[in-house]
Amino acid sequence: MSNSRKSAPRSFKPDSARVDSVHPAVNIEPRRGVKKPSLLILHYTGMASAAKAIDWLARPESKVSCHYVIDEAGCVTQMVPERLRAWHAGISYWRGETDINSRSIGIEIQNPGHEDGYPDFPARQMAAVIALSQDIVKRNRIGPEGVLAHSDVAPERKVDPGEKFNWALLARHGLGLWVRPSPLKADDAGLSIGATGEHVANAQRLLSQYGYNIQQTGIFDAAMAKVVRGFQLHFRPKRPNGHLDRSTMLTLSRLIAASSSDGTG
């Protein structure tokens, strides 16, 4: 940790023309085992303001950092050069990989989060997220399937950027794999903790196939509920309750088919 802090740049040239300012973080280090990222992870800050988030993300005692912060007005601050490993994903997993920080670029989007009102993401902010993300994925050759939520790679711990984040809009701009969610039915409570059987096993298999960290036991436990909720937050956001209803299962099946047809499955 001390070596990474000593190597922290006092300033650096932004990687993107979309950057408005640079505010270097100190919790950084070289990427491990890879030269370029293959994932783009989107977060919300969960703090009262972008200024407070940037201040915290720059402090060594925070033990966190990120590559970019985007405030509500769409202003972009870069904190870590893309060539370096930022500490944004924490304990995480995707498609067999556990060092997500080494394989990703992290964008923190200003929003106080679920514990403090969880407002909508403003249009100007979303426009900046799209513009910056398009630049990042183009330069780093990150495919649509590599644009993910923090809640995808760490569903047991995280729910950001959450159900209000407009993934469908991003997909229309070539960012993230997306299928139209299957309609919900009010009377479909779905399976929940304690359920067993073929439907549970099939869901576990498909969630694992897409990339989530889930054990294939055939038993619906608390860990599975968090993974299902993580999937819903991204791909079926109207009711992210962690229950395996028909809408969730149909949406998951269609996503797997789209992934396979896109050559990413």
Image (tube, rainbow, N blue to C red):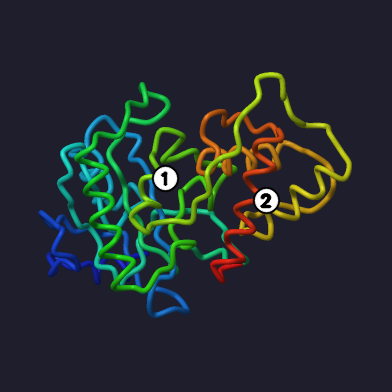
x and y percentages locating residue 139 in the rendered image? 28, 73
Which amino acid type is marked by label 1? Trp
Which amino acid type is marked by label 2? Ser
Q: How many numbered marks does the figure carry?
A: 2
Q: Quadrant of residue 118?
A: top left
For the residues labelled 2 and 1, the Cα–Cα distance comes to 18 Å
For label 2, count other residues whose C-alpha is less than 10 Å away and answer few (under 14), some (14-19) or many (20+): some
- What number is the disc on residue 226? none
**Which quadrant would the C terminus be assigned to in this image?**
bottom right
**Considering depth in this image, is 14 or 174 the residue closer to the camera?**
174
Vertical position of residue 60 compared to residue 221: above or below: below
Tell me what residue is drawn at x 44 percent, y 56 percent.
Answer: 176
x and y percentages locating residue 40 in the rendered image? 39, 60
x and y percentages locating residue 145 in the rendered image? 49, 62
- What number is the disc on residue 253? 2
State left or right for residue 254 relative to residue 102. right
State left or right for residue 176 relative to residue 15. right
Q: Quadrant of residue 87?
A: bottom left
For label 1, count other residues whose C-alpha is less than 10 Å away and answer few (under 14), some (14-19) or many (20+): many
Q: What residue is shown with label 1?
A: 167
Give the SS element for disc 2.
Answer: helix
**Which quadrant would the N terminus be assigned to in this image?**
bottom left
Tell me what residue is drawn at x 60 percent, y 53 percent.
Answer: 255
Tell me what residue is drawn at x 57 percent, y 28 percent.
Answer: 239
Give the SS element for disc 1.
Answer: helix
